[in-house]
Image: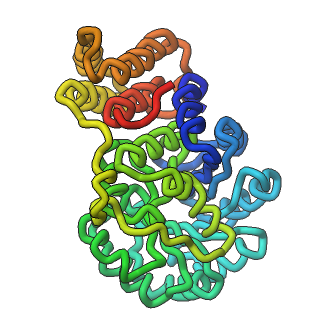
Amino acid sequence: MYADHLLVPWFDSLSAAVPGLSVVDAHTHIGGNDPGGFTSQVDELVEALALVDGRAAVFPMSEPGGYRQANLSCTEAAAEHPDRLVAFARVTPEENPRGLLEEALDAGARGMKLHLSSDEFSLDDPRLAGALDLADEQHLPVMVHAGPEVESLRASVLAACSGRPGMQMILAHCAIPDLAHLAPHVDDVPNLFFDTSWWTPANLLALLRLVPPGRVLAASDLPYSTPLAATVATVRCAWQAGLGPEEVLSVAGGQMSRLLDREQPLDLGPAPSQRDDPKTAEASPFSSVLEVVTTNLLASVEAMQRGLEPEVPLQVARHACSVPTGQPDEAVLTSVLRLLDLYDEHRDALPRRNPFTPGRDVLLTAAVVARTPAAPLP
């Protein structure tokens, strides 16, 4: 999907460096009626997962007409592709949430999704109590949208997790509204997790440094990214943050696999920011040149997310990649330039599959590579 075929060498370099790397994407969608204009079909998701030989939790995109049939479509897709997909039921307070969840569980679902902004409700809505109680009783993972448009939900999250210890709550999108406030409390709520489905490496690095590695789950948010591109970003940021091989394996899919199987999650120790081991510091410094490259590429990507062309920031980033032979950043910048060349070579052939400008994932991967000089390169 998108330009995944161009990014395979960067995924392969990480797989070689972390033997046993197994991808379980915590956050993907299928559907064709989302008001935002993004769509994703089952075959696209399955093909994207096949590229990384991975699995994923899948739930419906926004469905203005309700989620009963959309949930059953997810369970049917999971039944057809049991080696790739695990269905979650998306519920709202207005649709008899416990009944909706029970029906989906009977059809094979193994988790629940709550989208607080798109479906316009709050986590502490009393009508959700029955569904949350069922998640507690059956030890289900519960994915909660926690994107930038959501107001603070930390009080309701902590209350829900402490009151229902059998439920495994996952805050999506690096818990953008509340990460700094929730990170100090993770020891109090061992059933709280965070996914990495966001596009800026700064947010991923903050999450991976502030939260214990056993609580971080790799996620793409397909169709906004793909399992391959998101895994490259998450694993590279995990490496840069100082995580070891066992921790990287957990983040990439090991812990999510346990949650899907309703097994006890593993405790992999404290967050890097709480460790005394000097090896948890960034293994390679982030230089001024790399900062110029990263910030300008991210500016390009932001424009592409609005359907525009990358224009001047891309030119600035390319110029910054030109350094004298023998400079400390030379290998990283060479890899970034290879990605920029791939973008130039293929930009006109990439289809506009969704509202993003084609090639956005290539330039975003280049920005991630520039921000993670410690991680392996092809």
Q: Is residue 170 above or below residue 82?
A: below
Q: Which of 361 and 194 lies nearest the eye of the viewer?
A: 194
The reply, left or right, for residue 194 in relation to residue 102 is: left
Quarter holding residue 185: bottom left
The reply, left or right, for residue 334 in relation to residue 62 is: left
Q: Which of 317 and 372 lies nearest the eye of the viewer?
A: 372
The reply, left or right, for residue 258 in relation to residue 242 is: right
Q: Residue furthest left?
A: 288
**Residue 330: x %, y % from top left:** 32, 18
The answer to whether residue 36 of the structure is visible from this angle is yes
**Residue 292: x %, y % from top left:** 20, 26
**Residue 316: x %, y % from top left:** 22, 17
Query: Which quadrant is home to the N terminus?
Result: top right
Q: Residue furthest bottom?
A: 163
Which residue occupies 70% across, 42% down? 53
Please give the count of numbered marks on the rendered protein. 0
Quarter holding residue 375: top left
The answer to whether residue 119 of the structure is visible from this angle is no
The reply, left or right, for residue 145 in relation to residue 42 is: left
Which residue occupies 23% across, 16% down? 320
Which residue occupies 56% across, 26% down? 9
Q: Is residue 113 above or below residue 129?
A: above
Which residue occupies 37% across, 50% down? 242
Q: Is residue 287 above or below residue 62?
A: above
**Residue 281: x %, y % from top left:** 28, 50
